[in-house]
Image (cartoon, rainbow, N blue to C red):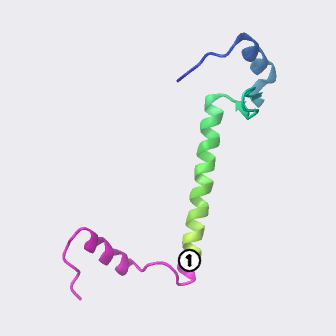
């Protein structure tokens, strides 16, 4: 759903420039930020990249600590889940 800003909100947003606008929901007192869609997209992409880097770093640390599943074990599990013949030794 896309709503149009009221004239007051639009004026306040333009007056605040690229900093966005903090608004409060009077029913819940929750605070929201109104920002340009491109700024929001860039922020979400940066967050995703940071989360990806953290997940990769955790995986590397687990691997270096000898934790996790070996590649051979992972493939055996995949074959079993797909009812494929097991690899010959």
**Residue 33 screen position, x and y as percent:** 72, 32
Q: Quadrant of residue 50?
A: bottom right
Instruction: Give yes or no for residue 71 being in the magenta stretch.
Output: yes
Which residue is most to the bottom? 89
Residue farthest to the front, as pictured = 27
Q: Is residue 36 found inside the magenta-colored segment of the image?
A: no
Q: Is residue 68 above or below residue 23?
A: below
Viewer-closest of 23 and 15: 23
**Number of marks drawn:** 1
Q: Is residue 34 left or right of residue 48?
A: right
Asked whether, in this view, residue 1 is left or right of residue 81, the answer is right
Residue 80 image-quadrant placement: bottom left
* Residue 1, image x, y percentages: 52, 24
State the residue position of label 1: 62
Question: What residue lies at 75% left-to-right and 26% top-to-bottom?
Answer: 26
| Magenta highlight range | 62-89
Residue 68 horizontal/vertical position (percent): 48, 78
Q: Mark 1: give few (<14), some (14-19) or many (20+) Cα within 10 Å.
A: few
Of residues 8 and 38, the one nearer the viewer is: 8
- Compared across the picture, whether 66 is left or right of 75 comes to right
Outermost residue, top direction? Answer: 7
Please report the residue visible at 21 percent of the width from the left and 85 percent of the height from the top.
88
Residue at image position (55%, 65%) is 56
Query: What residue occupies the far left of the structure in this picture?
Result: 85
Residue 41 horizontal/vertical position (percent) = 59, 37
User: If the image is split into quadrants, where does the C terminus sit?
Assistant: bottom left
In the depicted view, which residue is nearer to us: 18 or 35? 35
What residue is rendered at 78% in x and 24% in y?
A: 17
Residue 34 falls in which quadrant of the image? Answer: top right
Residue at disc 1, secondary structure: helix
């Amino acid at each position: 759903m896309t709503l149009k800003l009221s004239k007051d909100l639009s004026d306040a947003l333009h007056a605040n420039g690229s900093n966005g606008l903090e608004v409060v929901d009077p029913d819940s007192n929750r605070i929201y930020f109104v920002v340009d869609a491109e700024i929001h997209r860039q922020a979400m992409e940066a967050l995703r990249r940071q989360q990806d880097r953290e997940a990769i770093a955790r995986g590397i640390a687990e691997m270096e600590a000898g934790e996790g599943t070996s590649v051979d074990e992972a493939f055996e599990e995949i074959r079993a889940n797909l009812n494929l013949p097991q690899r010959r030794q």
